[in-house]
Amino acid sequence: MRIGVSAPIVEPHPTGVGVYSINLVNELTKLYDDLLLYTSYPSAFKIAPVKVRRVSRLTRPERGLTGFLSRLMWMQTSLTLRTLYDGASVIFSTGSEGTLLPLVPQVVTVHDIIPILFPSFHPHTSELIFFRRFLPWILRRSAAAIAVSESTKKDLIKLYHLPAEKIHVIYEGYETGLFYPRENTQTVTRTYGLERYIHYGGNILPHKNVATLIQAFKLITSNVPHQLVLQGRRDSKYAVGLETMVKELGLEGRVVFLGYVPLNHLPYLYGGATVFVTVSLSEGFGLPPLEAMACGTPVVASKTSSLPEVVGDAGILVDPNDAEQIARALLRVIEHPELRADLSRKAMKRAALFSWSKAARQTLEVLKSVVKGK
């Protein structure tokens, strides 16, 4: 059995699907030797060059809509033919952008269908067309689908009417050699001018509900000396509105936009925070809160979509639409050291349930079963 892995959605500063692709492929290569990787950024992976098939840089996600359309075109043309030429037994797509008419059995990972759930947050017509028309077609013609949470699986069944037995839930993991409690976090946090702070990590996009988080933070600013640190890539249009809100609420200097930070800084930013918070309206999985938990940081998270699956009883779950409830949860963690210590212990224990090696083993089993059943 030869596995072809389609992972063009990787770039020099990966987030989300890129992080998933890199870590899962690196673990798969430890478990299975006959594997070919199709990617535009080979240096992100720990794989022998002879097993890499280069893809055009035009497909990278940092190119935005152009990259998205280029990936779709590449998958329907070059990938389809290349898998035949390379003798692949199965093609595994690490993202949802699979092949419409696969010539070998195809397995596709679906991380979320947020554009369908919140279409007003995704104004690009091409993106909505893909999720409404193309993705259902791709999944119906795939031998199996992998969902990164039970929440995503339920969405696929409800909105795309996929049979439950076709969807395999395989949770993501985290880099255990990177995300663990650090003794001296100030070596990094001080370079950003941070002392006491609440940490949000993730892309700054509308469905992440950062505006409500800022409003919640405003409610507790007179009670705590903390800053609210917003770390992650920003959607330029949405970010302008948030920056305006910060000014109107008189929070300049209290709310800090860090933008993208180096990967090796993240454990220190997580560990140096009093509390990590994410009040997203919807998440396919929720990698940042898992990474924060692995670093022993108390977590406040939405009680919606997949986040309860990740956080469990190791954090405080809140209504993402209730700024006062969010504020109370943050204040409770900040003001009670014993609660922080208890949540920290639970967080590390909970995080240990997730791993990329486990995800890779389960993924390999799905791929093998697809080939045996063809």
Image: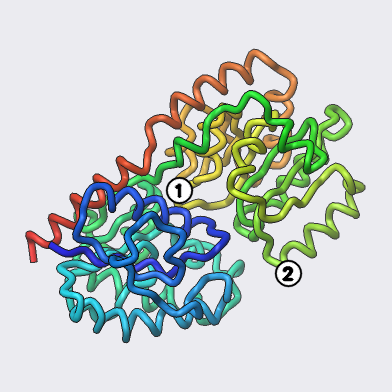
| Screen quadrant of the C terminus | bottom left
Pick the front one: 69 or 122: 69
**Image position of 128 with respect to 145: above or below:** below
**Image position of 331 with respect to 7: above or below:** above
Left or right: where 40 falls relative to 192: left
Which residue matches tag 1?
285
Using a 10 Å C-alpha cutoff, classify the residue at mark 2 as few (fewer than 14 neighbours), some (14 to 19) or many (20 or more).
few
**Image position of 93 with respect to 126: above or below:** above
Q: Give coordinates of residue 74: x percent, y percent.
A: 38, 82
**Image position of 108 with respect to 154: above or below:** below
What amino acid is at disc 2?
Answer: Lys
Q: Give coordinates of residue 366: x percent, y percent.
A: 20, 53
Q: Give coordinates of residue 201: x percent, y percent.
A: 63, 46
Using a 10 Å C-alpha cutoff, classify the residue at mark 1 as few (fewer than 14 neighbours), some (14 to 19) or many (20 or more).
many
Residue 333 is drawn in which quadrant?
top right
Q: Residue at x 51, y 32 (%)?
A: 294
Which residue matches tag 2?
237
Rounded to the nearest angstrom, the CA distance separating label 1 from label 2 is: 25 Å
Residue 317 is drawn in which quadrant?
top right
What amino acid is at disc 1?
Answer: Phe
Q: Residue at x 13, y 55 (%)?
A: 369
Label whose residue precedes the other's in the sequence (1 or 2):
2
Q: Give coordinates of residue 93: x percent, y percent.
A: 32, 65
Res. 128 visible in picture: no
Left or right: where 342 falls relative to 74: right
Pick the front one: 171 or 45: 45
Res. 286 visible in picture: yes
**How many numbered marks does the figure carry?**
2
Secondary element at image label 2: helix
| Screen quadrant of the N terminus | bottom left
Secondary element at image label 1: loop
